[in-house]
Image (cartoon, helix red, strand yellow):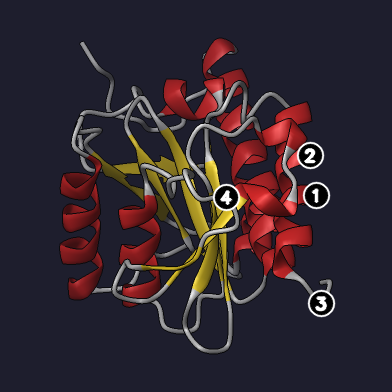
Amino acid sequence: MSGDLRSDLIAAAKHFYDRGWMVGTAGNLSARLPDGSFWITASGRAKGQLTEQDFIRMNSDGAIVEQPVADSRPSAETSIHLAVYNCFPDAKACYHVHSIEANLVSRLTVGDAVPLPAIEMLKGLGVWEENPQVSIPLFTNYLEVPKIAKEIGEFFAIGAPSVPALLIRDHGITVWADSPAAAYNYVEIVEYIFRYTIAARQLNLDLRFESRD
């Protein structure tokens, strides 16, 4: 991790863009400073070409603290990052990407959670069990993002999830971690698991999903 958290976010965004997970201006990344404020990608910025001017620093109340470019606006999904930081005080980074696989996986169930296959990569998300029964919570993709954030906050107020990740239907994943480096790894791992899931479905392997009829 570098001295300026924005450098870590720029490097991660470029990598995710190259993987096709942040095409166009899609997705958003944030990292939290010791005072509780956090840098988040500005709205409408191409994620493969970010500079330090393409971020806005917000406080824990959702107000702008620092705005390198006067007419820039914080990501439209800032409220989701705020919900995550409020629910998980130890979180120091929150990454949200849009992948084809995540959208497809979100359609494999009609419920409010996506079961994950019991494969080795779950260890990378902190799951160390024999034949684990793990799922990612699944949220409705409302047009009004604060409505999504409200449901996330209400859900996690009841209890923490099995893994540090959530999925928004037809939208993408959000992960959080105690460092930008860990959040980077979580995105990679979750996306690997989703690719495995889609491949398994294509091979007609029984992953015990509830089908959408």
Q: In front here: 163 or 50?
A: 50
* Disc 1/disc 2 C-alpha distance (Å): 6 Å
Q: Circle 3 sits in a helix, a strand or a loop, which is it? A: loop
Q: Please name the residue that numbered disc 1 is placed on.
A: 11
* Disc 4/disc 3 C-alpha distance (Å): 21 Å
Residue 203 locus on image (x, y percent): 59, 13
Counting every numbered tag in the picture gives 4
Query: Which quadrant, please, contains the N terminus?
Result: bottom right
Q: Please name the residue that numbered disc 3 is placed on.
A: 3
Residue 2 locus on image (x, y percent): 84, 72
- The amino acid pointed to by label 3 is Gly
- The amino acid pointed to by label 4 is Val
Residue 208 locus on image (x, y percent): 38, 33
Q: Circle 1 sits in a helix, a strand or a loop, which is it? A: helix
- The amino acid pointed to by label 1 is Ala
Disc number lying in front (1 or 2): 1
Q: Please name the residue that numbered disc 2 is placed on.
A: 15
| Up-down relation of residue 167 to residue 59 (above or below) | above
- Residue 39 appears in the picture as rendered: yes
| Up-down relation of residue 45 to residue 35 (above or below) | above
Q: How crowded is mark 2: few (under 14 residues within 10 Å), some or many (20 or more)?
A: some
In the picture, the disc for residue 111 is none
Residues at marks 1 and 2 touching, judged by CB atoms closer than 8 Å: yes
Disc number lying in front (4 or 2): 4
Q: Please name the residue that numbered disc 4 is placed on.
A: 69
